[in-house]
Image (cartoon, rainbow, N blue to C red):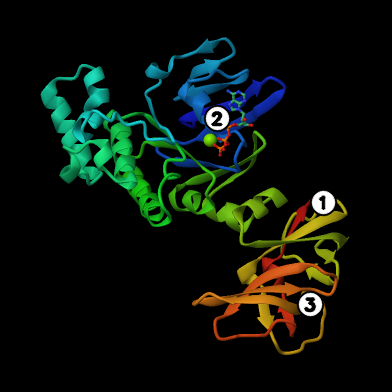
Amino acid sequence: MAFLELKGLTKRYGALTVVDHVDLAVEKGNLVCLLGPSGCGKTTTLRLIAGFIDPDAGEIRVGGRVISSGGFSEPPERRKMSMIFQSYALWPHMTVRENIGYGLALRKLPRTDIARLVDKILAVTRLQALSDRYPGELSGGQQQRVSLARALVVEPETLLLDEPLSNLDANLREEMRFEIRRLHDEYRYTTVYVTHDQAEAMTTADLIVVMNLGRIEQVGSPEEIYERPQSEFVARFLGGTNILKGRRLDADTVECGSVRLRCGDGDFAGREDAVVSVRHHDIVLTPESREEGLNWAKGTVVRQVYLGSHRDYLIELPGGEQVRTIAQADLAIERGKPVWLHFPMQHCRALAR
Ligand SMILES: Nc1ncnc2c1ncn2[C@@H]1O[C@H](COP(=O)(O)OP(=O)(O)OP(=O)(O)O)[C@@H](O)[C@H]1O
Ligand SMILES: [Mg+2]
């Protein structure tokens, strides 16, 4: 049995259903990411789990026990959860040490126990040297670590993180992703992590839940979600992919304008309208002329950019479709020149529209 279970969880604001019959099972000790665009209901789902708001339908169970259902709701302070908000919400007049110990002091633990637990978490989050500073004297990343430490020190059963890295610059964000995963591996709290950043989800999560308009689009490991998106929305949202619209010629072949693509993967039972998803880096580009046949197309270079490790090409096909692909850095083909593209069958995924 899963540790945290959401069943038919639904939340409405007026006429708008912002969380729509969400079913989700999180195993104990797993880190699950809710990934989706702005407004898709991630924060609302997290607040329902924390108990700050109540659902209109459905239920939430922890360890098999119902903590929220129609008419019943266990108050947040009894749920043994810690939530980290997008803004760190540190107390400005308390030092790092006092901020971290605050939750323990509220629980009226003896001073010596508080000191011991705070020291331990200061070491784990590498904050010892900063323990007597005030939040105003810390960088964004350091404040972030303090808010993590403060959430961890109370030893929650469940950790809820709402876009915890969104205020950091790109470098620090990347570093903190690994930090969060490292802390997770050390403590193994059951964690729900909300983000709209694909790379963040892929680095930290055991399981990714892609949300769209209050519903779950797909649940899977980072590899499953990336390699085998089940819908056009998921393929697009994960980025780095071309979506070619077309119609089916037979179960596994889709005609997308001027190119016919036999697909090695995907949904073959769908309707006549189909899209093919193929990643930029899976398309092979060559300046040597080829016969155009199945999974081959002739195109024209619209632009190309040198990016050090490779070149990024935008190619226009005869039907006007544009395709992004990459090539080795020393393959420089001028704008307007013809090229031939190969779409390897095993990398073409047919999806229903
Ligand atoms: N208290 C509220 N009253 C009315 N509508 C609300 C309320 N809270 C959220 N919403 C609406 O619910 C939808 C989902 O909001 P939510 O905050 O869960 O999105 P999100 O996925 O966290 O987005 P973001 O990535 O921008 O933080 C939005 O359309 C939002 O405007
Ligand atoms: Mg949000």
| Crowd rating for badge 1 (residues with CA inside 10 Å; few <14, some 14–19, many 20+) | some
Residue 43 on image: x %, y %: 53, 32
| Crowd rating for badge 2 (residues with CA inside 10 Å; few <14, some 14–19, many 20+) | many
Residue 149 on image: x %, y %: 28, 37
- Residue at the image point whose x is 33% and y is 32% from the top: 151
Residue 177 on image: x %, y %: 40, 50
Q: Which residue is mark 1?
A: 270
Q: Secondary structure at mark 1?
A: loop
Mark 2: C-beta under 8 Å from nearest atom of ligand 1:
yes
Residue 49 on image: x %, y %: 49, 26
User: Is 319 rendered above or below residue 289?
Assistant: above
Residue type, numbered disc 1: Gly
| Residues at marks 3 and 1, CA–CA distance in whole angstroms | 25 Å
Q: Which residue is mark 3?
A: 297
Residue type, numbered disc 2: Thr
Q: Which residue is situated farthest in the bottom direction here? A: 288
Residue type, numbered disc 3: Ala
- Residue at the image point whose x is 46% and y is 14% from the top: 74
* Residue 144 as seen in the image, left or right of residue 322: left
Mark 1: C-beta under 8 Å from nearest atom of ligand 1:
no
Of circles 3 and 1, the one toward us is 3
Residue 341 lies in what quarter of the image? Answer: bottom right
Res. 182 visible in picture: yes
Residue 85 lies in what quarter of the image? Answer: top left
Q: Secondary structure at mark 2?
A: helix
- Residue at the image point whose x is 26% and y is 32% from the top: 153
Q: Answer with mark 3 or mark 1, whichever residue precedes in sequence.
A: 1
Q: Answer with mark 2 or mark 1, whichever residue precedes in sequence.
A: 2
Res. 231 visible in picture: no
User: Is 266 rendered above or below residue 182?
Assistant: below
Residue 83 lies in what quarter of the image? Answer: top left
User: Is 350 rendered above or below residue 338?
Assistant: above
